[in-house]
Amino acid sequence: TQLLEQSPQFLSIQEGENLTVYCNSSSVFSSLQWYRQEPGEGPVLLVTVVTGGEVKKLKRLTFQFGDARKDSSLHITAAQPGDTGLYLCAGEYGNKLVFGAGTILRVKS
Amino acid sequence: DAGITQSPRYKITETGRQVTLMCHQTWSHSYMFWYRQDLGHGLRLIYYSAAADITDKGEVPDGYVVSRSKTENFPLTLESATRSQTSVYFCASSQGQGYGYTFGSGTRLTVV
């Protein structure tokens, strides 16, 4: 059974601070995906990383896939209140996704 | 409207009743999935489908039945609802490996 451990579970920071969310596993995945979920809605895809060592940037968000394709990180620079939400990492194997438990991010103004 | 639609958004049912959650997508994506989301467990895969008439079990399939007679529809049936099936259910679709999922807005199901 593939498992993804996501940390931290909860993060409360001030506007303008930087933060990093980690996603770790002992399994190798064909891709690692990051989603953001707001209350009452389904998760929305932010990015997919496929190649070991790959780095993708989405405005103030930087995503990295580990060299061995077992782990990933999400770094947010100068967090804004609009970044508040639940961030989920998901590892892909055989066209299915296994999800981490999520990180609840709260950015205070 | 294009997208993935789940219905109903909210449902309360009694223990032992059969209930069906609907999922409809307009992109003709091959893959469709059902997940449940619970505090402390995150999103767990119930069933998935690679194409019409092809379905397979996920991590937590017991007590659920799916069918996929048409590419665009993927209903999930709880044959005899139990309180442990109280959850938020999400349907998702995907073009395939590496493309990411598009999720519906979810159905909040309460079994009393």
Image (spheres, rainbow, N blue to C red):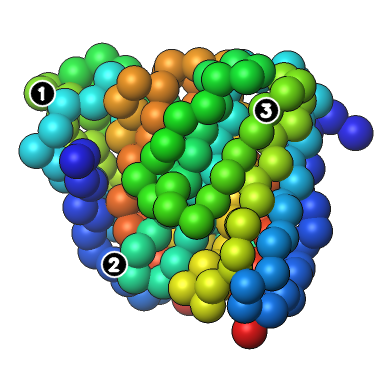
Residue type at tag 2: Gln
Q: Check disc 2: other Cα within 10 Å, few if <14, some if 14-19, many if 20+.
A: some
Pick the residue in front: A62 or A109: A62
Check chain identity for marks 3 and 1: say if they share one: no
Pick the residue in front: A58 or B68: B68
Q: Are marks 3 and 2 in contact (CB under 8 Å)?
A: no
Q: Secondary structure at mark 3?
A: loop
Judging by the rendered image, the residue that carries numbered circle 1 is A68
CA gap between label 3 and label 2 equals 36 Å
Judging by the rendered image, the residue that carries numbered circle 3 is B68
- Of the 4 image quadrants, the one containing the N terminus of chain B is top right
Does residue B21 appear to the left or right of A51 in the view shown? right
Residue type at tag 3: Arg
Q: Secondary structure at mark 1?
A: loop
- Of the 4 image quadrants, the one containing the C terminus of chain B is bottom right
Residue A4 image point, x, y percent: 23, 46
